[in-house]
Image (spheres, coloured by chain):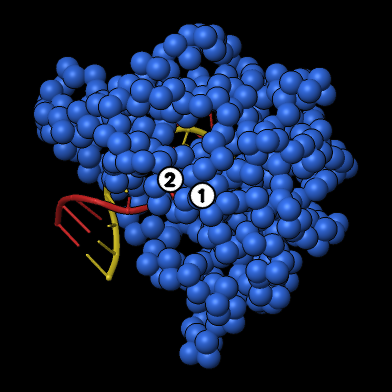
Chain colours: A blue, B yellow, C red
DNA sequence: TTCCCTTTGAAGATC
DNA sequence: GATCTTCAAAGGGAA
């Protein structure tokens, strides 16, 4: 179990494999970033438009498969780079260099760090919880719904057999209620100007190649939260009982999920008809760093580029993600770590395996189909 | 109506 | 231990 890593390392990446990060240097990275962002949209659009053309040309480097492989290679390099970075971050935390701006208003004070021996508090946890930054309120609010004592593991919304799983051992929070008390000041900072879930907060522009360099500090706009603003109103805005965890969704499709989100606070208790349904609610995986980043930046990219297709947007976001500085990325890694910690505490018996098989078509099948097609084209 | 696309990262599965 | 597979979000587009 990775969570049980000993040796003081956190889950941000194993430190045992230190492939030297090809330190193009942050300067180079930044220099490339401008060029990068300017070409983002053009590249994406070009790749989309020329996709079929590219597929037919085996000599073209930018084919989808090549792109994917390239990203994977890059990913590995980056992953190591980030591990390196995280070490740096850890080293600098005490020195005050790394004071994550992302965690102001973070509702979970003194979250015990399971990645440290004896459940001791990690320095980052401590600082993250207490430091308040001017530009802060941020995506931390994405954790807010976790911060609800309705989501304790004994909640009736949880599958009853979760604790039956052998081999899954997760420690319980000592006092989850302490984490769930939402400081009104923290969440109340979200202004009405903050866009929510895809609503543009920037003037629509034609996005001529992303001329704006990616801001070094996280913007205060965009959708910081995984959950509607109504969820971040603090205790007064919450139903006292039965509010399901946002990670819990009905076992069916997306539309139902959306409706579920809309009603989740209006109807904390399932209707009698639902009682007949034996289906257990699905507890979703906690979001990783990149997912958190995407949630936050998606609206901005949409506004800048007037793109709507998530595939294209995600390509841009992937590039921007790599263009982020280590410090900027560290914010999201730390946030993701908190998410996982909280998720672990809320659902000690949950396993990612629980959601395996939810997708209709296995990626493997598709890749095999694709390979067979490619073999025809390339042979 | 359902699934695909596309991204990165985490975690489980497999060898 | 290394590698592979699946899922997490998002929403337009295709089937």
Quadrant hosting residue A238: bottom right
- Res. A61 mark: none
Q: Residue at x 33, y 45 (%)?
A: A310
The reply to whether residue A159 is visible in this rendering is: no
Do circles 1 and 2 both sit on a common chain? yes
Q: Residue at x 64, y 44 (%)?
A: A137
Q: Does A217 sit above or below residue A359?
A: above
The reply to whether residue A130 is visible in this rendering is: yes
Question: In this orientation, which residue lies closer to the viewer: A300 or A13?
Answer: A300
Q: Does A372 sit above or below residue A346?
A: above
Say whether residue A350 is left or right of residue A123. Answer: left
Say whether residue A90 is left or right of residue A20. Answer: right
Q: Residue at x 70, y 35 (%)?
A: A133
Extreme residue in the bottom direction: A272
Q: Chain of mark 2?
A: A
Mark 2 highlights which residue? A201
- Res. A194 mark: 1
Quadrant hosting residue A338: top right
Say whether residue A256 is left or right of residue A78. Answer: left
């Amino acid at each position: 179990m990775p969570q049980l890593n000993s040796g003081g390392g956190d889950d941000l990446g194993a430190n045992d494999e230190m492939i030297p990060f090809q330190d193009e240097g942050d300067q180079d990275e930044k220099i490339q970033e401008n060029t990068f962002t300017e070409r983002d949209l053009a590249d994406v659009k070009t790749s989309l438009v020329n996709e079929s053309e590219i597929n037919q040309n085996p000599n073209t480097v930018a084919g989808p498969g090549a792109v994917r492989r390239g990203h994977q290679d890059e990913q590995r390099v980056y992953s190591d780079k980030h591990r390196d970075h995280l070490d740096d971050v850890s080293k600098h935390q005490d020195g005050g260099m790394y004071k994550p701006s992302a965690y102001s208003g973070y509702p979970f004070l003194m979250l015990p760090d399971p990645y440290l021996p004896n459940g001791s508090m990690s320095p980052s946890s401590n600082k993250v919880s207490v430091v308040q930054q001017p530009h802060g309120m941020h995506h931390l609010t994405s954790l807010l719904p976790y911060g609800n004592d309705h989501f304790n593991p004994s909640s009736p919304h949880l599958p009853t057999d979760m604790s039956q799983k052998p081999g899954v051992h997760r420690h319980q929070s000592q006092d989850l209620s302490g984490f769930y008390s939402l400081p009104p000041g923290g969440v109340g900072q979200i202004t009405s100007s903050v866009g929510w879930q895809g609503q543009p907060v920037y003037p629509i522009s034609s996005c001529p190649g992303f001329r704006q360099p990616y801001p070094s500090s996280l913007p205060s706009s965009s959708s910081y939260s995984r959950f509607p603003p109504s969820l971040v109103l603090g205790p007064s805005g919450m139903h006292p009982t039965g509010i399901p965890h946002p990670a819990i969704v009905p076992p069916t499709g997306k539309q139902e999920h959306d409706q579920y989100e809309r009603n989740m606070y209006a109807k904390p208790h399932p209707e009698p008809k639902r009682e007949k349904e034996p289906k257990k609610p699905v507890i979703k995986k906690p979001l990783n760093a990149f997912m958190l980043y995407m949630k936050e930046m998606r609206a901005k990219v949409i506004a800048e580029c007037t793109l709507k297709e998530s595939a294209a947007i995600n390509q841009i976001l992937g590039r921007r993600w790599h263009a982020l500085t280590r410090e900027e990325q560290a914010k999201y890694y730390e946030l993701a770590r908190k998410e996982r910690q909280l998720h672990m505490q809320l659902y000690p018996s949950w396993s990612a395996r629980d959601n395996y098989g939810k997708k209709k078509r296995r990626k493997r099948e598709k890749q095999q189909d694709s390979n067979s097609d490619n073999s025809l084209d390339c042979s």
